[in-house]
Image: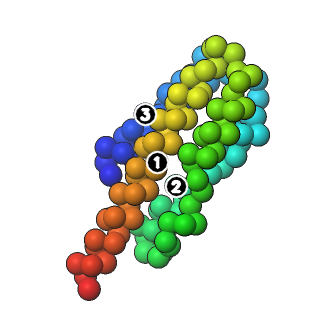
Amino acid sequence: MLASSHALVYAVMSLEAGMIQSPPRGPAPAFQTFANDVEFTLYLLAAVLRGWRGTGEELPKLRDDHRHLVEAGQALSPSEAFLLLETDRLTVSLNTLREQVFRYVNLAAQITS
């Protein structure tokens, strides 16, 4: 979980650095949806670690969001292309962290039972 968390933070930091260097023309609806779903995923993972018993089905499908972002990204300039790369890295690390959190919670529940 620590390695996945680090990868997530690096992706977010890279997005921030890229946006400072080359600010996008404005948040496209696909990017706004992606950002909202990333935030909601982090919120739910924190809730799971605090004891909420979700199934994981409640979590947004970040890969679908990213695919929509790529489709909408056809209008991105070359200097904004970093957005697609870093959001892909963010998607991979957050999906991996999600799997690890649920595996950890299920294992902890088995041990305490």
Q: Residue at x 69, y 27 (%)?
A: 73
**Residue 20, how many percent across, how many down?**
61, 21
Q: Amino acid at mark 2?
A: Leu
Q: Residue at x 48, y 61 (%)?
A: 45
Q: Which residue is mark 1?
A: 94
Q: Residue furthest top?
A: 78
Residue 35 appears in the rendering: no
Q: Amino acid at mark 3?
A: Tyr
**Residue 10: which numbered mark, if any?**
3
**Residue 51: which quarter of the image?**
bottom left
SS state under label 2: helix
Disc 3 versus disc 1: nearer the observer: 1
**Residue 5, how many percent across, how many down?**
38, 46
Q: Are marks 2 and 1 in contact (CB under 8 Å)?
A: yes
In the depicted view, which residue is nearer to us: 74 or 8?
Answer: 74
Work out whether 106 lies above or below 71.
below
**Residue 76: which quarter of the image?**
top right
Please state if 77 lies on the left or on the right of 97 as rendered. right
The quarter of the image holding the C terminus is bottom left
Q: Are marks 3 and 1 in contact (CB under 8 Å)?
A: no
Which is nearer the N-term, disc 2 or disc 1?
2
**Residue 42: which numbered mark, if any?**
2
Work out whether 37 lies above or below 78.
below
Q: Are marks 3 and 2 in contact (CB under 8 Å)?
A: no
Q: Amino acid at mark 1?
A: Leu
